[in-house]
Amino acid sequence: MRTTPLVEGEYYHLYNRGVDKRTVFTDPGEYKRFLAYLYMLNSHRDDIRPSDFFRTHTVQDAFGIKRGNCLVALGAYCLMQNHFHLYATPLVENGISKFMQRLQTAYTKYFNEKHKRTGSLFGCTFKSQHISTDRQAKYLFSYIHLNPAKLVDPVWKERGPRDWKKLLIFIEKYPYSSYTEYLSNQYNIIEPSHFPSYLKNRKEKANHITDWLQYQESA
């Protein structure tokens, strides 16, 4: 049972990984399906049924669904092979819990049917960390979007990046994080208006990432 309340107007780092650290995204289609769920299941509507919808529609069609009011606002996300990260604030009472239950249940059902398996896919309900200061928020923004860097340089955090410019180019092109939405100023899943103003400034966001990489390189 969750003991820490998830309160409207507050910010949280939400994350989860596959049970026994197993892979939960095995191909691009699975990443894209989860991204579609991040959008379509973030809604007060109870009549959105992913399994029915995708019998006749594509992933891209999901982003045309009229959601009405959302349960949460997302400020950042990143999907990795065996885990995911979200930066979120609840817009209604119990918004995060309801959204996460919908998200993980729908994806587990899809994944299990596709791979002919049963049982839990994720290791727990989900984990959360309260983000209460600007320093924590800026750290989290960089942390989430720099997750893919280890695909290019697995030990960059421990030893410093071999080539921080190469890592920056890689994360800018990584298709399964919200950094691409920020760089393009085309927001499908994230809603920056619900988050601190520095996340809305393209130059400042890029500086957070660049400064982190350069600091790690010189450390």
Image: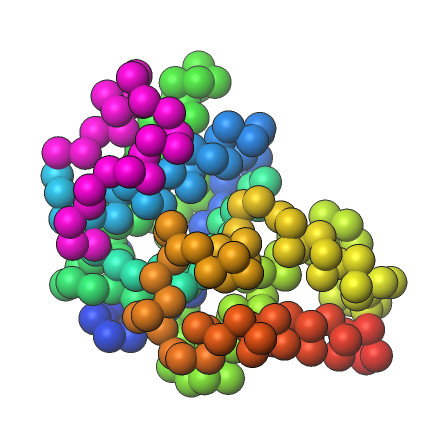
State which region is magenta.
Answer: 47-70
Residue 30 place in picture, x, y as percent = 49, 30
Q: Quadrant of the N terminus?
A: bottom left
Locate the C terminus by quadrant: bottom right
Answer with left or right where residue 37 lies relative to residue 166: left
64 vs 117, nearest the viewer: 64
Residue at the far right in the pictured view: 162
Judged left or right of residue 192, residue 176 is: right
* Residue 133 point in image, percent of width and height: 42, 85
Left/right placement of residue 98 relative to residue 114 reads left
The image shows a total of numbered marks equal to 0
Is residue 200 located in the magenta-colored stretch of the structure? no
Of residues 119 and 198, which is closer to you in this image? Answer: 198
Residue 14 seen anywhere in this rendered image of the structure = no
Figure quadrant of residue 7: bottom left
Give the answer, above or below, for where 34 lies relative to 10: above
Q: Residue at x 53, y 34 (%)?
A: 25
Name the residue: 26% across, 59% down.
72
Say above or below: 218 vs 50: below
Looking at the image, which residue is at 71% across and 52% down? 170
Q: Quadrant of residue 145?
A: bottom right
Residue 168: x and y, percent? 71, 61
- Going 79% across and 65% down the picture, which residue do you hit? 164
x and y, in percent, of residue 174 in the image: 62, 48
Q: Is residue 124 visible?
A: yes
In the rendered image, residue 49 lying in the magenta stretch gets the answer: yes
Q: How does the figure colour the protein chain or chains?
A: rainbow
